[in-house]
Amino acid sequence: MKLAVVGGGSTYTPELIDGFARLRDTLPIEELVLVDPAADRLELVSGLARRIFAKQDHAGKITTTTDIDAGVADADAVLLQLRVGGQAARNQDETWPLECGCVG
């Protein structure tokens, strides 16, 4: 199975990768493609992801790209893990409900 993770440079990705690694017998990922516009984040996260796969004896290959079209090409599944507007948008998403008396 080829799985693409759009937003793969996120700080949430290592936890996701750990889950995939633990489910290696149930979820047979042959290639995991991390897609993100930030190449520096991809480099950091993919290094950690490879170590997580290795520690769990997961044979899957982890690749990275900043090109979304290339990253999702021929993927069996695509996981969208992104927030339009980045962390500034997250702050807004989580604080304005509080101003309205709701949980953020």
Image (cartoon, grey):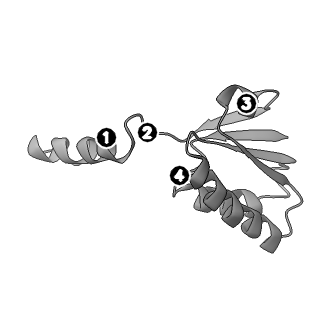
The residue beneath circle 3 is: 72
Residue 51 drawn at (x, y percent): 75, 69
Which one is earlier in the sequence, the residue at label 2 or at label 1?
A: 2
Which one is earlier in the sequence, the residue at label 3 or at label 2?
A: 3
Give whichever of 86, 102 is nearer the camera.
86
User: Disc 2 residue type?
Assistant: Arg
Q: Which residue is drawn at 54% across and 42% down?
A: 81
Q: Is residue 101 positioned above or below 21 on the image?
A: above
Residue 52 drawn at (x, y percent): 73, 68
Which one is earlier in the sequence, the residue at label 4 or at label 2?
A: 4
Residue 62 drawn at (x, y percent): 79, 52
In the picture, the quarter occupied by the N terminus is: top right
Are there few (<14), some (14-19), or many (20+) residues within 10 Å of tag 3? many
Residue 97 drawn at (x, y percent): 18, 42
Are there few (<14), some (14-19), or many (20+) residues within 10 Å of tag 2? few
Residues marked 2 and 1 touching at CB (< 8 Å):
yes
Q: Provide the secondary structure element on which disc 3 rests.
A: helix
Q: How far apart are marks 3 and 4 (CA)?
A: 17 Å
Q: How far apart are marks 3 and 1 (CA)?
A: 25 Å
The residue beneath circle 1 is: 89
Q: Which residue is drawn at 51% across and 58% down?
A: 11
Q: Provide the secondary structure element on which disc 2 rests.
A: loop
The residue beneath circle 2 is: 83
